Image (cartoon, rainbow, N blue to C red):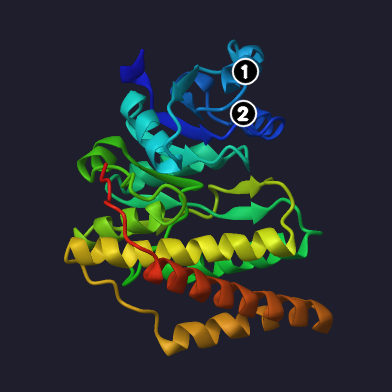
Amino acid sequence: MSRHLRASVVVPSSGRPGIVEQCIEGLCRQSIPVSDFEVIIVDDGCSPPVESRLTTYAGRLALTCLRVPPGGPAAARNAGARRAGGSLLVFLDDDCVPSESWLAAYLAAHEADPSAILTGPVANGQPSNQFAEAYHMLLTFLLRRHVPHQSGSRMPFLASANFAVERHLFLQLGGFDEEFRTAAEDRAFCAKAAHLGHRFRFVPEAAGVHLSPPLTLFSYASQQFSYGRGACRLRRWSHRHRWPASLESPAFYGALLREPMLHGPLMRRVRLSFLVLLSQVALASGLLWEALSPQTEHRSS
């Protein structure tokens, strides 16, 4: 059966009850026939196992639950990719609910440009949460600047929460580097693909909605701190591979600081400006912390 599959959707799951079910419900509502794709849920050592909550979907989707030892999302996605039978790999986080046209949009874009690496937008599913709003504003800013519609980018960026790539190309590139257990595995994958001359395309119709638990001031700052640590690991990784890891230009940071001024009333703009500044302080702190920490032996995929 796998040779007839147009796509394999790989969803790493950390076992968040209620959220992964919403993700799968969204996959059940796709506009293309369910016989055209499979869904592989990769259980990253969850307790209780995710499979116990998925029995009701067995007759609605070609659904596989693959349980692997805890190793982080990069390792989980790689395991799902190795198991996949579809020609197009589509990665989706378990806290993202895809739109009905999500998979059809990816398949159309892939057919138009089979060698391109594709990514779509992820909307904020909690608009009343100011920290989630700031996070998604930053994510949208990065996607808009670094994933143009037609050509490559000097510093391409895609979020591993929602992207698609031809399966053979993904495996040829070695998948995600499992050295990155918490952050920056997507940026490392982008850096490798860009270095080898591959194209990136933004597919606006391949949209998902992010439903993760509400962010707080502490969890927002911690998240950005973790991204800073990941950025430092990425620079070390790039140096080992002798690939240049260029810094963002002053114009980039100027545009980033101006971005909140485009969003609504004055108090909202002030709040978002503060959270953008906080993100940059937390990122810089995480980068410095990682730079000053003893380096451990790296583990490549």
The answer to whether residue 147 is visible is no
Give coordinates of residue 115: x percent, y percent. 27, 48
Amino acid type, callout 2:
Ile
Q: Which residue in the structure is indicated by mark 1?
A: 54
Residue at image point 40% right, 85% down:
249
**Is 161 left, or right, of 128 in this rendering?**
left
- Is the residue 192 above or below the residue 212 in the image? below
Q: Is the residue under label 1 in contact with that under label 2 (CB below 8 Å)?
A: yes
Q: Nearer the viewer, residue 286 or 160?
A: 286
**Is 20 left, or right, of 150 in this rendering?**
right
Element carrying mark 1: loop
Residue at image point 70% right, 80% down:
274
Q: Nearer the viewer, residue 186 or 14?
A: 14
Please tell me in which quadrant of the rendered image residue 151 appears: bottom left
Amino acid type, callout 1:
Leu
What crowding class fits label 1: few (fewer than 14 Cα within 10 Å), some (14-19), or many (20 or more)?
A: some
- The circle on residue 196 is none
- The circle on residue 24 is 2
In the displayed orientation, state which residue is furthest to the front. 294
Q: From the image, which quarter does the C terminus lie in?
A: top left
Give coordinates of residue 43: x percent, y percent. 51, 27
**Labels 2 and 1: the sequence-earlier one:** 2
Residue at image point 71% right, 56% down:
215
- Is the residue 228 above or below the residue 21 in the image? below
Give coordinates of residue 174: x percent, y percent. 24, 43
Label count reads: 2
- Give the mark toward the camera: 2 or 1: 1
